[in-house]
Amino acid sequence: MRLAELSERSGVPIATIKYYLREGLLAPGRQINARTAEYDEEHLRRLRLVRAMIQVGRVPVATVREVLGHVDDDSLGRAIRLGAAMWALPQVPEPDEDDEYVQAAQQEVNALLDQLGWENAKRLTTISPAYRSLVVAVAAFRRLGYGWGAELLAPYAELMHRTAVLDLDNMETHPSEAERIEFAILGAILNEPVLQSLHRLAQEEETTRRYGFE
Amino acid sequence: MRLAELSERSGVPIATIKYYLREGLLAPGRQINARTAEYDEEHLRRLRLVRAMIQVGRVPVATVREVLGHVDDDSLGRAIRLGAAMWALPQVPEPDEDDEYVQAAQQEVNALLDQLGWENAKRLTTISPAYRSLVVAVAAFRRLGYGWGAELLAPYAELMHRTAVLDLDNMETHPSEAERIEFAILGAILNEPVLQSLHRLAQEEETTRRYGFE
DNA sequence: CTTCCTTGGGGAGTGCCACTGTCCAAGCAT
DNA sequence: ATGCTTGGACAGTGGCACTCCCCAAGGAAG
Protein backbone atom coordinates (compact mmCIF):
# COMPACT_ATOMS: atom_id res chain seq x y z
CA MET A 1 0.00 0.00 0.00
CA ARG A 2 1.12 3.57 -0.67
CA LEU A 3 1.54 6.37 1.81
CA ALA A 4 -1.86 7.78 0.89
CA GLU A 5 -3.60 4.49 1.66
CA LEU A 6 -1.65 4.04 4.88
CA SER A 7 -2.83 7.48 5.87
CA GLU A 8 -6.43 6.74 4.98
CA ARG A 9 -6.61 3.39 6.76
CA SER A 10 -4.93 4.67 9.91
CA GLY A 11 -6.59 8.07 9.99
CA VAL A 12 -3.20 9.72 10.45
CA PRO A 13 -2.47 12.70 8.12
CA ILE A 14 0.21 12.11 5.48
CA ALA A 15 2.39 14.93 6.81
CA THR A 16 2.31 13.34 10.25
CA ILE A 17 3.29 9.92 8.91
CA LYS A 18 6.23 11.54 7.14
CA TYR A 19 7.19 13.12 10.44
CA TYR A 20 7.05 9.75 12.21
CA LEU A 21 9.18 8.21 9.44
CA ARG A 22 11.74 10.97 9.86
CA GLU A 23 11.72 10.51 13.63
CA GLY A 24 12.32 6.79 13.26
CA LEU A 25 9.00 5.71 14.84
CA LEU A 26 8.08 3.83 11.67
CA ALA A 27 10.34 1.76 9.41
CA PRO A 28 10.63 3.10 5.84
CA GLY A 29 8.49 1.35 3.23
CA ARG A 30 9.93 -1.05 0.71
CA GLN A 31 11.40 1.14 -2.02
CA ILE A 32 9.83 0.22 -5.39
CA ASN A 33 11.59 2.92 -7.36
CA ALA A 34 13.07 6.32 -6.72
CA ARG A 35 9.69 7.89 -6.05
CA THR A 36 7.46 5.08 -4.84
CA ALA A 37 7.45 3.12 -1.59
CA GLU A 38 5.27 0.22 -0.53
CA TYR A 39 3.92 -0.28 3.01
CA ASP A 40 2.32 -3.41 4.46
CA GLU A 41 -0.02 -4.46 7.28
CA GLU A 42 2.86 -4.47 9.74
CA HIS A 43 3.47 -0.79 9.06
CA LEU A 44 -0.22 -0.09 9.62
CA ARG A 45 -0.18 -1.97 12.92
CA ARG A 46 2.93 -0.20 14.12
CA LEU A 47 1.52 3.16 13.10
CA ARG A 48 -1.66 2.52 15.10
CA LEU A 49 0.45 1.53 18.10
CA VAL A 50 2.48 4.73 17.81
CA ARG A 51 -0.69 6.81 17.53
CA ALA A 52 -2.25 5.11 20.55
CA MET A 53 0.86 5.75 22.62
CA ILE A 54 1.06 9.40 21.60
CA GLN A 55 -2.62 10.36 21.64
CA VAL A 56 -4.11 8.11 24.29
CA GLY A 57 -1.02 7.46 26.39
CA ARG A 58 0.37 11.00 25.96
CA VAL A 59 3.83 9.52 25.56
CA PRO A 60 6.37 11.95 24.05
CA VAL A 61 7.73 11.08 20.61
CA ALA A 62 11.27 10.57 21.87
CA THR A 63 9.97 8.12 24.48
CA VAL A 64 7.95 6.20 21.91
CA ARG A 65 11.13 5.73 19.89
CA GLU A 66 12.90 4.44 22.99
CA VAL A 67 10.09 2.06 23.93
CA LEU A 68 9.85 0.68 20.39
CA GLY A 69 13.59 0.05 20.45
CA HIS A 70 13.05 -2.24 23.43
CA VAL A 71 10.05 -3.93 21.82
CA ASP A 72 12.16 -4.81 18.80
CA ASP A 73 15.19 -5.87 20.79
CA ASP A 74 15.01 -9.67 20.95
CA SER A 75 18.20 -9.87 22.96
CA LEU A 76 16.54 -8.64 26.16
CA GLY A 77 14.87 -10.83 28.76
CA ARG A 78 11.22 -10.47 29.60
CA ALA A 79 11.46 -8.56 32.87
CA ILE A 80 13.92 -6.14 31.28
CA ARG A 81 11.63 -5.50 28.32
CA LEU A 82 8.63 -4.95 30.58
CA GLY A 83 10.66 -2.68 32.82
CA ALA A 84 12.02 -0.77 29.84
CA ALA A 85 8.51 0.06 28.72
CA MET A 86 7.30 1.25 32.09
CA TRP A 87 10.42 3.13 33.03
CA ALA A 88 10.39 5.09 29.82
CA LEU A 89 6.95 6.52 30.62
CA PRO A 90 6.56 10.23 31.36
CA GLN A 91 8.04 11.31 34.64
CA VAL A 92 7.61 14.14 37.06
CA PRO A 93 10.68 16.28 37.79
CA GLU A 94 13.42 14.73 39.92
CA PRO A 95 12.76 15.03 43.66
CA ASP A 96 15.01 17.53 45.41
CA GLU A 97 16.83 15.38 47.98
CA ASP A 98 17.54 18.39 50.23
CA ASP A 99 13.90 19.35 50.56
CA GLU A 100 12.53 18.46 53.98
CA TYR A 101 9.13 17.49 52.57
CA VAL A 102 10.77 15.16 50.08
CA GLN A 103 12.77 13.50 52.85
CA ALA A 104 9.66 13.04 54.96
CA ALA A 105 7.79 11.65 51.96
CA GLN A 106 10.60 9.20 51.29
CA GLN A 107 10.44 7.86 54.82
CA GLU A 108 6.68 7.58 54.52
CA VAL A 109 6.90 5.62 51.28
CA ASN A 110 9.65 3.38 52.63
CA ALA A 111 7.49 2.63 55.66
CA LEU A 112 4.65 1.79 53.31
CA LEU A 113 6.77 -0.66 51.33
CA ASP A 114 7.88 -2.32 54.57
CA GLN A 115 4.34 -2.55 55.82
CA LEU A 116 3.18 -4.13 52.57
CA GLY A 117 6.11 -6.46 52.33
CA TRP A 118 6.98 -5.27 48.85
CA GLU A 119 10.54 -6.49 49.11
CA ASN A 120 11.27 -6.40 45.40
CA ALA A 121 10.01 -2.85 44.98
CA LYS A 122 12.10 -1.87 48.00
CA ARG A 123 15.24 -3.09 46.27
CA LEU A 124 14.46 -0.86 43.29
CA THR A 125 13.87 2.39 45.17
CA THR A 126 17.12 3.96 44.07
CA ILE A 127 16.37 3.55 40.38
CA SER A 128 12.61 3.17 39.92
CA PRO A 129 10.90 6.20 38.34
CA ALA A 130 7.62 5.06 39.88
CA TYR A 131 9.13 5.31 43.35
CA ARG A 132 10.47 8.76 42.65
CA SER A 133 7.22 10.11 41.26
CA LEU A 134 5.32 8.71 44.24
CA VAL A 135 7.69 10.55 46.55
CA VAL A 136 7.18 13.79 44.62
CA ALA A 137 3.39 13.47 44.80
CA VAL A 138 3.35 12.65 48.52
CA ALA A 139 5.74 15.54 49.19
CA ALA A 140 3.39 17.90 47.32
CA PHE A 141 0.53 16.84 49.62
CA ARG A 142 2.64 17.36 52.72
CA ARG A 143 3.73 20.80 51.58
CA LEU A 144 0.06 21.74 51.50
CA GLY A 145 -0.41 20.53 55.03
CA TYR A 146 -2.14 17.23 54.36
CA GLY A 147 -0.59 14.29 56.15
CA TRP A 148 -0.59 11.48 53.65
CA GLY A 149 0.99 8.74 55.69
CA ALA A 150 1.63 5.06 55.15
CA GLU A 151 -1.60 4.24 56.98
CA LEU A 152 -3.69 6.17 54.44
CA LEU A 153 -1.63 5.03 51.48
CA ALA A 154 -1.73 1.33 52.34
CA PRO A 155 -5.34 0.62 51.32
CA TYR A 156 -4.74 2.37 47.99
CA ALA A 157 -1.56 0.38 47.45
CA GLU A 158 -3.45 -2.81 48.22
CA LEU A 159 -6.01 -2.00 45.54
CA MET A 160 -3.30 -1.09 43.03
CA HIS A 161 -1.57 -4.36 43.74
CA ARG A 162 -4.73 -6.24 42.87
CA THR A 163 -4.91 -4.21 39.69
CA ALA A 164 -1.35 -5.22 38.80
CA VAL A 165 -2.26 -8.87 39.41
CA LEU A 166 -5.14 -8.47 36.96
CA ASP A 167 -2.73 -6.88 34.46
CA LEU A 168 -0.34 -9.79 34.58
CA ASP A 169 -3.09 -12.41 34.57
CA ASN A 170 -4.48 -10.84 31.42
CA MET A 171 -1.06 -10.80 29.86
CA GLU A 172 -0.54 -14.49 30.57
CA THR A 173 -3.67 -15.44 28.64
CA HIS A 174 -1.79 -14.63 25.44
CA PRO A 175 -0.20 -17.73 23.95
CA SER A 176 3.04 -16.55 22.34
CA GLU A 177 5.91 -14.83 24.10
CA ALA A 178 6.09 -12.11 21.44
CA GLU A 179 2.40 -11.35 21.80
CA ARG A 180 2.69 -11.29 25.59
CA ILE A 181 5.51 -8.76 25.40
CA GLU A 182 3.57 -6.52 23.04
CA PHE A 183 0.42 -6.78 25.13
CA ALA A 184 2.34 -6.04 28.31
CA ILE A 185 4.03 -2.98 26.90
CA LEU A 186 0.83 -1.80 25.30
CA GLY A 187 -1.04 -2.55 28.48
CA ALA A 188 1.43 -0.70 30.66
CA ILE A 189 0.92 2.37 28.50
CA LEU A 190 -2.74 2.20 27.55
CA ASN A 191 -4.05 0.74 30.79
CA GLU A 192 -3.38 3.92 32.65
CA PRO A 193 -5.86 6.06 30.73
CA VAL A 194 -8.40 3.27 31.18
CA LEU A 195 -7.78 3.10 34.92
CA GLN A 196 -7.83 6.87 35.24
CA SER A 197 -11.12 7.12 33.38
CA LEU A 198 -12.66 4.34 35.45
CA HIS A 199 -11.48 6.06 38.60
CA ARG A 200 -13.07 9.35 37.61
CA LEU A 201 -16.28 7.63 36.55
CA ALA A 202 -16.35 5.83 39.88
CA GLN A 203 -15.84 9.12 41.69
CA GLU A 204 -18.76 10.62 39.81
CA GLU A 205 -20.91 7.62 40.62
CA GLU A 206 -20.01 7.59 44.30
CA THR A 207 -20.30 11.36 44.70
CA THR A 208 -23.78 11.44 43.25
CA ARG A 209 -24.78 8.39 45.30
CA ARG A 210 -23.79 10.19 48.46
CA TYR A 211 -24.83 13.73 47.70
CA GLY A 212 -27.18 13.54 44.71
CA PHE A 213 -26.98 15.86 41.73
CA GLU A 214 -27.99 19.01 43.69
CA MET B 1 6.03 39.12 52.90
CA ARG B 2 7.56 40.44 49.69
CA LEU B 3 7.74 38.74 46.32
CA ALA B 4 11.32 37.63 47.00
CA GLU B 5 10.34 35.93 50.24
CA LEU B 6 7.29 34.34 48.64
CA SER B 7 9.60 32.98 45.98
CA GLU B 8 12.10 31.68 48.50
CA ARG B 9 9.55 29.98 50.75
CA SER B 10 7.70 28.35 47.87
CA GLY B 11 10.72 27.50 45.76
CA VAL B 12 9.06 29.09 42.73
CA PRO B 13 11.25 31.53 40.72
CA ILE B 14 10.22 35.19 40.93
CA ALA B 15 9.70 35.42 37.17
CA THR B 16 7.32 32.48 37.34
CA ILE B 17 5.33 34.02 40.19
CA LYS B 18 4.99 37.18 38.12
CA TYR B 19 3.71 35.04 35.28
CA TYR B 20 1.13 33.38 37.54
CA LEU B 21 0.03 36.80 38.79
CA ARG B 22 -0.43 37.97 35.22
CA GLU B 23 -2.36 34.81 34.35
CA GLY B 24 -4.70 35.35 37.28
CA LEU B 25 -3.64 32.18 39.13
CA LEU B 26 -2.65 34.19 42.15
CA ALA B 27 -4.38 37.25 43.63
CA PRO B 28 -2.23 40.43 43.58
CA GLY B 29 -0.58 41.31 46.88
CA ARG B 30 -1.81 44.10 49.12
CA GLN B 31 -0.38 47.25 47.60
CA ILE B 32 1.67 49.13 50.21
CA ASN B 33 2.81 51.86 47.89
CA ALA B 34 3.40 52.31 44.20
CA ARG B 35 6.39 49.96 44.16
CA THR B 36 5.82 47.54 47.04
CA ALA B 37 3.29 44.78 47.55
CA GLU B 38 2.73 42.57 50.55
CA TYR B 39 1.82 38.86 50.36
CA ASP B 40 0.56 36.65 53.18
CA GLU B 41 0.33 32.99 54.13
CA GLU B 42 -2.78 32.58 52.02
CA HIS B 43 -0.84 33.61 48.94
CA LEU B 44 1.89 31.10 49.80
CA ARG B 45 -0.68 28.35 50.22
CA ARG B 46 -2.41 29.15 46.97
CA LEU B 47 0.92 29.32 45.16
CA ARG B 48 1.87 25.86 46.43
CA LEU B 49 -1.51 24.53 45.31
CA VAL B 50 -0.99 26.01 41.85
CA ARG B 51 2.50 24.55 41.62
CA ALA B 52 1.29 21.12 42.71
CA MET B 53 -1.47 21.16 40.12
CA ILE B 54 0.89 22.23 37.33
CA GLN B 55 3.97 20.18 38.17
CA VAL B 56 2.56 17.07 39.82
CA GLY B 57 -0.89 17.02 38.28
CA ARG B 58 0.28 18.29 34.86
CA VAL B 59 -2.77 20.51 34.70
CA PRO B 60 -2.53 23.29 32.06
CA VAL B 61 -2.40 26.85 33.33
CA ALA B 62 -5.74 27.76 31.74
CA THR B 63 -7.36 24.79 33.50
CA VAL B 64 -5.84 25.75 36.83
CA ARG B 65 -7.42 29.17 36.47
CA GLU B 66 -10.77 27.56 35.71
CA VAL B 67 -10.55 25.13 38.65
CA LEU B 68 -9.56 27.89 41.06
CA GLY B 69 -12.54 29.90 39.88
CA HIS B 70 -14.78 27.06 41.04
CA VAL B 71 -12.89 26.68 44.31
CA ASP B 72 -13.51 30.34 45.10
CA ASP B 73 -17.11 30.35 43.96
CA ASP B 74 -19.17 30.01 47.13
CA SER B 75 -22.41 30.09 45.22
CA LEU B 76 -21.98 26.55 43.87
CA GLY B 77 -23.19 23.40 45.57
CA ARG B 78 -20.80 20.71 46.64
CA ALA B 79 -21.39 18.17 43.87
CA ILE B 80 -21.04 20.92 41.27
CA ARG B 81 -17.77 22.12 42.75
CA LEU B 82 -16.38 18.59 42.88
CA GLY B 83 -17.54 17.94 39.35
CA ALA B 84 -16.10 21.21 38.13
CA ALA B 85 -12.67 20.22 39.39
CA MET B 86 -12.70 16.76 37.86
CA TRP B 87 -14.26 17.76 34.57
CA ALA B 88 -11.72 20.49 34.02
CA LEU B 89 -8.88 17.97 34.09
CA PRO B 90 -6.88 17.25 30.94
CA GLN B 91 -8.81 15.37 28.31
CA VAL B 92 -8.03 13.17 25.36
CA PRO B 93 -9.29 14.34 21.97
CA GLU B 94 -13.02 14.02 21.30
CA PRO B 95 -14.06 10.55 20.13
CA ASP B 96 -15.02 10.40 16.47
CA GLU B 97 -18.64 9.22 16.59
CA ASP B 98 -18.48 7.83 13.06
CA ASP B 99 -15.55 5.54 13.81
CA GLU B 100 -16.63 1.91 14.04
CA TYR B 101 -14.17 1.17 16.83
CA VAL B 102 -15.48 4.09 18.84
CA GLN B 103 -19.04 2.86 18.42
CA ALA B 104 -18.10 -0.64 19.52
CA ALA B 105 -16.20 0.78 22.49
CA GLN B 106 -19.21 2.87 23.48
CA GLN B 107 -21.45 -0.21 23.52
CA GLU B 108 -18.84 -2.05 25.56
CA VAL B 109 -18.63 0.73 28.12
CA ASN B 110 -22.40 1.08 28.30
CA ALA B 111 -22.69 -2.66 28.91
CA LEU B 112 -20.12 -2.31 31.66
CA LEU B 113 -22.06 0.47 33.40
CA ASP B 114 -25.22 -1.64 33.20
CA GLN B 115 -23.45 -4.66 34.59
CA LEU B 116 -22.05 -2.66 37.49
CA GLY B 117 -25.29 -0.86 38.17
CA TRP B 118 -23.65 2.54 37.96
CA GLU B 119 -26.93 4.27 37.26
CA ASN B 120 -25.73 7.76 38.04
CA ALA B 121 -22.68 7.48 35.80
CA LYS B 122 -24.95 6.15 33.07
CA ARG B 123 -27.03 9.30 33.23
CA LEU B 124 -23.92 11.41 32.71
CA THR B 125 -22.53 9.60 29.65
CA THR B 126 -23.43 12.36 27.24
CA ILE B 127 -21.47 14.99 29.14
CA SER B 128 -18.87 13.27 31.29
CA PRO B 129 -15.27 13.70 30.06
CA ALA B 130 -14.31 10.56 31.99
CA TYR B 131 -16.80 8.53 29.98
CA ARG B 132 -15.48 9.94 26.72
CA SER B 133 -11.84 9.32 27.52
CA LEU B 134 -12.64 5.76 28.57
CA VAL B 135 -14.31 5.21 25.22
CA VAL B 136 -11.28 6.59 23.39
CA ALA B 137 -8.89 4.33 25.29
CA VAL B 138 -10.99 1.20 24.79
CA ALA B 139 -11.36 2.04 21.08
CA ALA B 140 -7.57 2.34 20.77
CA PHE B 141 -7.20 -1.18 22.20
CA ARG B 142 -9.77 -2.57 19.80
CA ARG B 143 -8.11 -0.93 16.82
CA LEU B 144 -4.98 -2.88 17.72
CA GLY B 145 -6.92 -6.11 17.79
CA TYR B 146 -7.27 -6.60 21.54
CA GLY B 147 -10.78 -7.28 22.71
CA TRP B 148 -11.24 -5.30 25.88
CA GLY B 149 -14.76 -6.18 26.77
CA ALA B 150 -17.00 -5.45 29.72
CA GLU B 151 -16.04 -8.78 31.28
CA LEU B 152 -12.38 -7.78 31.45
CA LEU B 153 -13.09 -4.19 32.47
CA ALA B 154 -15.49 -5.06 35.27
CA PRO B 155 -12.89 -6.23 37.82
CA TYR B 156 -10.85 -3.10 37.18
CA ALA B 157 -13.94 -0.93 37.56
CA GLU B 158 -14.73 -2.68 40.82
CA LEU B 159 -11.28 -1.86 42.17
CA MET B 160 -11.54 1.74 41.00
CA HIS B 161 -14.89 2.05 42.71
CA ARG B 162 -13.32 0.96 45.98
CA THR B 163 -10.65 3.55 45.40
CA ALA B 164 -13.28 6.24 44.93
CA VAL B 165 -14.94 5.14 48.17
CA LEU B 166 -11.61 5.60 49.95
CA ASP B 167 -11.29 9.05 48.36
CA LEU B 168 -14.64 10.20 49.65
CA ASP B 169 -14.17 8.62 53.07
CA ASN B 170 -10.91 10.49 53.42
CA MET B 171 -12.58 13.68 52.36
CA GLU B 172 -15.30 13.30 54.95
CA THR B 173 -12.80 13.15 57.80
CA HIS B 174 -12.22 16.85 57.29
CA PRO B 175 -14.38 18.88 59.62
CA SER B 176 -15.28 22.05 57.72
CA GLU B 177 -17.12 22.24 54.44
CA ALA B 178 -14.52 24.60 52.96
CA GLU B 179 -11.69 22.29 53.89
CA ARG B 180 -13.55 19.29 52.47
CA ILE B 181 -14.05 21.07 49.17
CA GLU B 182 -10.39 22.02 48.95
CA PHE B 183 -9.26 18.53 49.89
CA ALA B 184 -11.62 16.96 47.38
CA ILE B 185 -10.47 19.17 44.53
CA LEU B 186 -6.86 18.74 45.51
CA GLY B 187 -7.38 15.03 45.93
CA ALA B 188 -9.08 14.66 42.57
CA ILE B 189 -6.04 16.25 40.96
CA LEU B 190 -3.15 14.99 43.07
CA ASN B 191 -4.49 11.54 43.81
CA GLU B 192 -4.01 10.42 40.27
CA PRO B 193 -0.22 10.70 40.22
CA VAL B 194 -0.21 8.84 43.54
CA LEU B 195 -2.42 6.07 42.18
CA GLN B 196 -0.44 5.86 38.97
CA SER B 197 2.85 5.59 40.83
CA LEU B 198 1.44 2.96 43.18
CA HIS B 199 0.16 1.03 40.19
CA ARG B 200 3.54 1.04 38.49
CA LEU B 201 5.29 0.11 41.71
CA ALA B 202 2.84 -2.75 42.16
CA GLN B 203 3.50 -3.90 38.61
CA GLU B 204 7.22 -3.92 39.28
CA GLU B 205 6.69 -5.85 42.49
CA GLU B 206 4.39 -8.39 40.91
CA THR B 207 6.49 -8.81 37.77
CA THR B 208 9.64 -9.54 39.73
CA ARG B 209 7.71 -11.87 42.06
CA ARG B 210 6.58 -13.90 39.09
CA TYR B 211 9.62 -13.78 36.88
CA GLY B 212 12.50 -12.61 39.05
CA PHE B 213 14.99 -9.94 38.02
CA GLU B 214 16.57 -12.02 35.21
C1' DC C 1 5.92 13.27 -27.04
C1' DT C 2 4.41 16.71 -24.03
C1' DT C 3 1.73 18.38 -20.47
C1' DC C 4 -0.12 17.78 -16.06
C1' DC C 5 -1.11 15.57 -11.89
C1' DT C 6 0.52 12.72 -8.10
C1' DT C 7 4.04 10.88 -5.06
C1' DG C 8 7.67 10.61 -1.46
C1' DG C 9 11.29 13.14 0.73
C1' DG C 10 13.16 16.87 3.38
C1' DG C 11 13.79 21.25 5.44
C1' DA C 12 11.66 25.14 7.24
C1' DG C 13 7.81 27.10 9.49
C1' DT C 14 3.67 27.12 12.86
C1' DG C 15 1.17 27.25 17.03
C1' DC C 16 0.91 26.34 21.63
C1' DC C 17 2.54 26.64 26.18
C1' DA C 18 5.16 27.40 30.29
C1' DC C 19 8.13 30.01 31.41
C1' DT C 20 12.27 33.66 31.45
C1' DG C 21 15.10 37.90 30.38
C1' DT C 22 15.13 42.73 30.02
C1' DC C 23 13.85 47.19 30.99
C1' DC C 24 12.05 50.85 33.71
C1' DA C 25 10.66 53.93 37.30
C1' DA C 26 9.94 54.12 42.23
C1' DG C 27 11.61 53.03 46.92
C1' DC C 28 14.89 52.20 50.47
C1' DA C 29 19.36 51.84 52.73
C1' DT C 30 23.68 53.83 53.48
C1' DA D 1 22.92 61.45 46.62
C1' DT D 2 24.07 57.16 45.12
C1' DG D 3 23.35 52.71 44.14
C1' DC D 4 20.85 48.49 44.95
C1' DT D 5 16.20 46.36 45.14
C1' DT D 6 11.39 45.97 43.89
C1' DG D 7 7.14 45.16 41.20
C1' DG D 8 5.14 45.50 36.79
C1' DA D 9 4.95 45.01 31.72
C1' DC D 10 6.23 42.88 27.56
C1' DA D 11 8.87 40.61 24.42
C1' DG D 12 11.40 36.83 23.78
C1' DT D 13 12.85 31.49 24.44
C1' DG D 14 12.81 26.62 24.05
C1' DG D 15 10.52 22.41 23.51
C1' DC D 16 7.36 19.79 21.08
C1' DA D 17 4.14 17.90 17.79
C1' DC D 18 3.03 18.61 13.97
C1' DT D 19 2.22 20.99 9.12
C1' DC D 20 3.47 23.61 4.88
C1' DC D 21 5.90 23.99 0.90
C1' DC D 22 8.88 22.86 -2.65
C1' DC D 23 11.26 19.69 -5.47
C1' DA D 24 12.22 16.03 -8.70
C1' DA D 25 10.59 11.62 -10.48
C1' DG D 26 6.79 8.75 -12.21
C1' DG D 27 2.70 7.83 -14.42
C1' DA D 28 -1.48 9.14 -17.11
C1' DA D 29 -3.98 11.66 -20.63
C1' DG D 30 -4.26 13.78 -24.91
Image (cartoon, coloured by chain):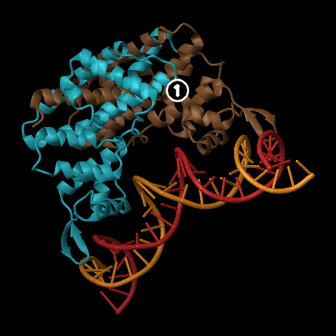
Chain colours: A brown, B cyan, C orange, D red
Q: Is residue A156 above or below residue C22?
A: above
Is any atom of residue A140 visible in this view? yes
Q: Position of residue B52 (x, y in %)?
A: 31, 45
Q: How many marks?
A: 1
Residue at (37, 43) in percent of width and height: B58
Q: Is residue A77 above or below residue B30?
A: above
Locate the N terminus of chain B and report the quarter of the image it occupies.
bottom left
Residue at (21, 52) in percent of width and height: B69
Q: Position of residue A38 (x, y in %)?
A: 73, 31
A204 or B27, which lies in front? Answer: A204
Q: Which residue is mark 1?
A: A85
Q: Quadrant of residue A45?
A: top right
Q: Position of residue B9 (x, y in %)?
A: 28, 54
Chain at tag 1: A
Residue at (31, 45) in percent of width and height: B53
Q: Position of residue B142 (x, y in %)?
A: 47, 22
Is any atom of residue B180 visible in this view? no
Locate the C terminus of chain B and report the quarter of the image it occupies.
top right
Q: Quadrant of residue B190?
A: top left
A18 or A142, which lies in front? Answer: A18
Q: Residues within 10 Å of mark 1 (few under 14, many from 20)?
A: many
Q: Is residue B139 above or below residue B187?
A: above
Residue at (68, 26) in percent of width and height: A40
Query: In this rendering, would A34 be left or right of A95?
Result: right
Q: Secondary structure at mark 1?
A: helix
Say what amino acid the circle numbered 1 marks.
Answer: Ala
Q: Is residue B150 above or below residue A64?
A: above
Query: In this rendering, would B17 be left or right of A120?
Result: left
Query: In this rendering, would B144 be left or right of B184?
Result: right
